[in-house]
Image (cartoon, rainbow, N blue to C red):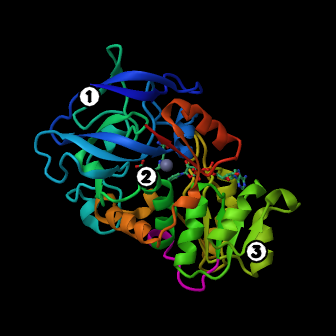
């Protein structure tokens, strides 16, 4: 079938809106009509060429919501008409990782997903007879996309897709990092580096966890108002200080914070986030994604003196099991999604969404078909 799609033909170039061909879903696969998709910084990261797994031409997008159109052979957990959120972290419920009880990092489709392919090693997307690669198992920048059954969370059909698409990545990642990865406890102090969709979701999660002090840090002070409304108690702009930001946080708190979160993808800030964690027990969670060849470093003494460095993917959330309940939370108002949506536009304007992100003017742009 034909589908309107925003295709990244080359790294560093604007997306092109074209009509691509989408082949029918094969065994264990599902054809989904995407209604809305958020634009996450990771889409921009891969488009920039910095992603070691970046492969072109590709249909990016991984923060979507839509409706099942057709299922392939053997698919039992969803049917045509079901409302779904595609998952870039699958949940097969059978692999070593799914059954470990320790992680959400399912490996059922991860190897082929990283190569831009469906689990059988081929692609369902093409343009003028040439294959187009899938992205993160989702490719939500196409109106119709094919996704593995294990990569779909079935959600309440009453949910507002313009909002709950953000649970496909940004908001779930931030909130999940607080509850599943850091396990923030009432009264704990928190520092959040980077106040985009991820950092603001961390702040929302920290408030849910009844954290005490929540220190929000960004070089763009226009983000502070929303950060305060989500629960930040202090907002700091590193550009207004002549000492390293970790020293500023330590001076504000005495010995540092119980938990810090890096939500930017900057390896120097990852170091600062680790080093502002409390002596003896503070932990720092890396959420931001850094480009090919970049590495983190610190003095080992920072770890010897009791700090822990952690990371999280999709906030540790098991998508098929836990995302439907998070959608219910959002419908009840226990997760706030509307304030994240600063812009909405049609797929034809998607390059503007990337411009707004790079200019620091948006939190999330939601694109509709
Ligand atoms: P975003 O661009 O919307 O937000 C980033 C924020 O960081 C901006 O507000 C920007 O002003 C701020 N910033 C930039 N440099 C800074 C600095 N030196 N000091 C302080 N603040 C600075 O991005 P986003 O969509 O919120 O994503 C954030 C990061 O999280 C990205 O790296 C993205 O790829 C990653 N991510 C990871 C996961 C995961 O599962 N681990 C999921 C989603 C996104
Ligand atoms: N492909 C990159 C890494 C990109 C990355 O770390 N992605 C995050 C999700 S970002 C969502 O916006 C993630 O979940 N990673 C775990 C996984 O399995 O992909 C690289 O460095 O190769
Ligand atoms: Zn994302």
Give the Cα separation between the discs numbered 2 and 1.
27 Å
> In the image as oriented, which residue stretches furthest toward the top?
128
The alpha-carbon separation of the residues under discs 3 and 2 comes to 37 Å
Q: Identify residue for label 3.
A: 250
Marking on residue 122: 1
The answer to whether the residues at label 1 and label 3 have Cβ atoms under 8 Å apart is: no
Q: Position of residue 32 (x, y in %)?
A: 29, 41
Q: Residue at x 39, y 37 (%)?
A: 139
Q: Residue at x 33, y 34 (%)?
A: 144
Q: Position of residue 38 (x, y in %)?
A: 49, 46
Q: Which residue is mark 2?
A: 165
Left-right relation of 151 to 349: left
Q: Residue 266 at x, y = what percent? A: 65, 50
Question: Neighbour class for label 1 at 10 Å: few (<14), some, many (≥20)?
Answer: some
Helix or strand or loop: what does disc 1 sit on? loop
- For marks 2 and 1, the one nearer the N-term is 1
SS majority, magenta: loop
Decide which of tag 1 and tag 3 comes sooner along the chain: 1
Asked whether, in this view, residue 121 is left or right of residue 244, the answer is: left
Residues shaded magenta:
180-189
Residue that protrudes farthest toward the bottom in the picture: 187
Q: Is residue 234 left or right of residue 173?
A: right
Q: Callout 3 environment at 10 Å: few (<14), some (14 to 19), or many (20+)?
A: some
């Amino acid at each position: 079938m034909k589908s309107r799609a925003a295709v990244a033909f080359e790294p560093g170039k604007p997306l092109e809106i074209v009509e691509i061909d989408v082949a029918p879903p094969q065994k264990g696969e599902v054809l989904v009509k995407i209604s809305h998709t958020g634009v996450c910084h990771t889409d921009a990261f891969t488009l920039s060429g910095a992603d070691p797994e970046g492969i072109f031409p590709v249909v990016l997008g991984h923060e979507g919501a839509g409706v099942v159109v057709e299922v392939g052979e053997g698919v039992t957990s969803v049917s045509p008409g079901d409302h779904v959120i595609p998952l870039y972290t699958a949940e097969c419920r059978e692999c070593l990782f799914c059954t470990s009880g320790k992680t959400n990092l399912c490996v059922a489709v991860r190897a082929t997903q990283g190569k831009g392919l469906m689990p059988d090693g081929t692609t369902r997307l093409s343009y003028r007879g040439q294959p187009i690669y899938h992205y993160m198992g989702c490719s939500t920048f196409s109106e119709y996309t094919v996704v593995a059954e294990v990569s779909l969370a079935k959600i309440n059909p009453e949910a507002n897709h313009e909002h709950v698409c953000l649970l496909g990545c940004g908001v779930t990642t931030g909130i999940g990092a607080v509850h599943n990865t850091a396990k923030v406890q009432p009264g704990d102090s928190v520092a959040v580096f980077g106040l985009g969709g991820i950092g603001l979701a961390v702040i929302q999660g920290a408030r849910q966890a009844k954290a005490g002090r929540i220190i929000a840090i960004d070089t763009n002070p226009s983000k502070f108002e929303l950060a305060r409304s989500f629960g930040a108690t202090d907002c700091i702009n590193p550009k207004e200080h002549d000492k390293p930001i970790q020293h500023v946080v330590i001076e504000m708190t005495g010995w540092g914070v119980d938990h810090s979160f890096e939500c930017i993808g900057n390896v120097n800030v990852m170091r600062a986030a680790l080093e502002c964690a409390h002596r003896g027990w503070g932990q720092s969670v890396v959420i931001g994604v850094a480009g090919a060849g970049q590495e983190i470093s610190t003095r080992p003494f920072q770890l010897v003196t009791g700090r822990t460095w952690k990371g999280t993917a999709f906030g540790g959330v098991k998508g098929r099991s836990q995302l439907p309940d998070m959608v219910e939370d959002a419908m009840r108002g226990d997760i706030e999604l509307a304030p994240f949506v600063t812009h909405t536009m049609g797929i034809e304007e998607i390059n503007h969404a990337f411009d707004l992100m790079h200019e620091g003017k948006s939190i999330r742009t939601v694109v509709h078909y």
